């Protein structure tokens, strides 16, 4: 039987490829973005507590109210924006599912979606699978600022959606107030929706502040704000996230959500609802990861790599043009097989040919792992 693929030119994610390669060659895995520290014992105990209490059956489709209420309170306290936990917040099976569902709500055949390269690898496939057309705008190197004049040039009468990610994976760039004003100006009198991927919302450095799109009176009315708990609580394998959106958008989101997963892990939702209520469990992360960033950058000072600025996330971009003429995928394979360090090449984050010599590493690792990694990388 013949099957026409919706994603004919798309293969296995680079994250899966590099992690498999890391395992095969017993390399230190700085590729996939997951922390290697222990999860809070308190959070583990809370999950166990609610399991033993019998909270093991289906949760309500939008998520348990207790968790939605705590998220609502958190957003109100940090961003001064109220989302009704009954009608405007939905608990999802991670941010990736939330992104796919939100894109599916908005995109029909022929709709255009503006996204920024280097772009996280799940956005374009979700658009394509719904018959949409990705429209790519390249961030300006070396600071990876958004070229708003080019965004305006790319917008057409078919533009339905703009997808933003801040703090940005893989560059670590954080949106500022000027970016918000530009986006407000572009979208104010246009029927364009926005998806704001904010999974690294609590990992911002150098006294900068994460500006959520929900803070804008203009933007919040047409935006799906998506985040998750995996990056925040070192629990990427638990796959629970959430979507905040005005009621008319959340209503459509839930229509699809119920037929994708219906509901997500019940005892973990209860555990998060208790743990998230204490802000000290996440407000420490900015300083925690800034120390990690600075520690790794100091270790790499004498290396032949050139390190880009990092404003947020737990990723560091590094230019290897002083070391090798290999293309970034080949160089990443070399590092994994011969040096024992698995990294992510930047080219898979681009739709078009990318000739840059840049790799991404994850510094959400224990100090001894970062030390060992830096020693290997400095030997090149």
Image (cartoon, rainbow, N blue to C red):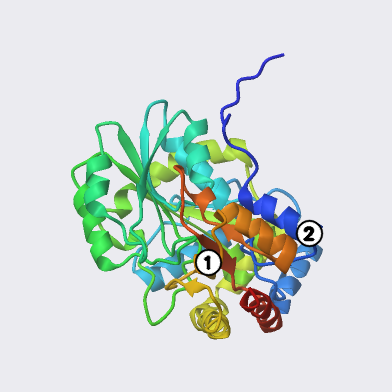
Query: Horizontal placement of 198 versus 368: left or right?
Result: left
Locate the C terminus and report the quarter of the image it occupies: bottom right
Q: Position of residue 118 (x, y in %)?
A: 44, 53
Residue 254 position (above or below residue 22): above
- Give above or below for 49 relative to 61: below
SS state under label 1: loop
For the point 64% across and 53% down, the residue is: 15
- Nearer the observer: mark 1 or 2; the answer is 1
269, 99: nearer the viewer: 99
Closer to the camera, 46 or 375? 375
Q: From where the camera sits, is residue 362 visible?
A: yes
Label 1: which residue? 320
Q: CA distance from mark 1 to mark 2?
A: 23 Å
What residue sits right under mark 2 in the picture? 23
- Say left or right for 216 vs 319: left
Residue in the image at 23% along x and 64% along y: 178
């Amino acid at each position: 039987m013949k099957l026409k693929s919706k994603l004919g030119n798309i293969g296995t994610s680079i994250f899966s490829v590099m992690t498999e390669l890391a395992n095969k060659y017993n390399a230190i895995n700085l590729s996939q973005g997951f922390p290697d520290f222990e999860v809070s014992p308190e959070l583990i105990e809370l999950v166990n507590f609610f399991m033993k209490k019998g909270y093991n059956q289906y949760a309500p489709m939008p998520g348990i109210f207790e968790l939605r209420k705590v998220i609502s309170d958190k957003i109100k306290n940090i961003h001064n924006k109220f989302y009704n936990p009954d009608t405007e917040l939905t608990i999802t099976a991670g941010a990736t599912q939330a992104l796919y569902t939100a894109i599916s709500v908005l995109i029909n055949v022929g709709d255009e979606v503006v996204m920024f390269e280097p772009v996280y690898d799940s956005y374009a496939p979700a658009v394509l699978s719904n018959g949409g057309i990705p429209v790519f705008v390249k961030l300006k190197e070396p600071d990876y600022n958004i070229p708003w004049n080019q965004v305006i040039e790319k917008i057409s009468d078919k533009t339905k959606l703009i997808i933003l990610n801040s703090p940005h994976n893989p560059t670590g760039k954080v949106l500022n107030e000027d970016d918000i004003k530009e986006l407000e100006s572009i979208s104010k009198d246009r029927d364009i929706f926005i998806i704001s991927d904010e999974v690294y919302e609590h990992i911002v450095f150098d006294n900068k502040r994460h500006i959520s799109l929900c803070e804008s009176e203009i933007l919040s009315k047409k935006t799906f704000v998506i985040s998750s708990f995996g990056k925040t609580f070192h629990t990427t394998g638990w796959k629970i996230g959430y979507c905040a959106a005005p009621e008319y958008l959340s209503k459509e989101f839930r229509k699809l959500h119920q037929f994708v997963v219906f509901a997500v892990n019940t005892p973990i939702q209860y555990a998060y609802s208790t743990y998230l209520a204490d802000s000290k469990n996440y407000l420490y992360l900015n300083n925690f990861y800034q120390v990690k960033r600075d520690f790794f950058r100091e270790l790499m000072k004498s290396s032949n790599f050139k390190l880009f600025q990092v404003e947020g996330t737990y990723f560091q971009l590094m230019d290897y043009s002083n070391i090798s003429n290999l293309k970034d995928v080949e160089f990443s394979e070399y590092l994994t097989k011969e040096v024992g360090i698995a990294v992510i090449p930047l080219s898979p984050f681009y739709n078009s040919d990318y000739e840059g010599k840049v790799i991404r590493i994850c510094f959400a690792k224990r100090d001894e792992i970062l030390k060992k990694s830096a020693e290997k990388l400095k030997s090149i």
